[in-house]
Amino acid sequence: MKLEITTPGKLIYKADIEQATLPGELGEFGVLPGHAPLISTLKIGVINIVEQNKTTHRVFVAGGFVEVNQTECSVLATEAYDLASITKEEAQGKLDKATIRLKVAENDIERNLAQIQINVFEALVQAI
């Protein structure tokens, strides 16, 4: 099955896979070749990509959508990070910057956006 994970500005992952487990809004679910057609929202979490009965790749997503059919799984994430390509220190740096943005926010919109980023980056730090 083909898996493609993209954000609005970047292709994060593209490969043929055996299976993937995704963080659906209503709970984790797995997709395999031959899966029934499905469209779902995703929550903050990790997509685990499985080859030969073991997880070979992990991609963190900050929510988004997934469309699945019998041969393809397409993920459009609001933000995504290949966990093999980011260190805990880099993720912590992103969290620190978001925390500073919250402290200097001048209005409710800025505060809300900073809080969302804090939630995402806290989950990213924990996922690494």
Image (tube, rainbow, N blue to C red):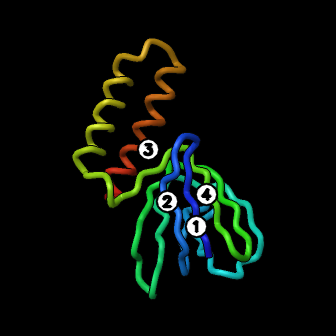
- Between disc 2 and disc 4, the foreground one is 2
Marking on residue 75: 4
Helix, strand or loop at disc 1? strand
The quadrant in which the C terminus is found is: bottom left
The quadrant in which the N terminus is found is: bottom right
Look at the numbered discs 2 and 1 and tell me whether their residues touch, using CB distance below 8 Å: yes
Helix, strand or loop at disc 3? helix
Marking on residue 115: none
**Label 4, label 1: how far apart the Cα atoms are:** 8 Å
Residue occupying the point 44% across, 56% down: 60
Marking on residue 3: 1
Look at the numbered discs 4 and 1 and tell me whether their residues touch, using CB distance below 8 Å: yes
| Picture layout, residue 71 above or below residue 12 | below
Amino acid type, callout 2: Tyr
Residue furthest top in the image: 106
| Residue 94 in the image, given as x and y percentages of width and height | 32, 37
Ranked by sequence position, the earlier of labels 2 and 1 is 1
Q: Residue under circle 2?
A: 13
Q: Residue under circle 3?
A: 120
- Between disc 4 and disc 3, the foreground one is 4
Residue occupying the point 56% across, 68% down: 28
Amino acid type, callout 4: Val
**Label 3, label 2: how far apart the Cα atoms are:** 19 Å
**Label 2, label 4: how far apart the Cα atoms are:** 10 Å
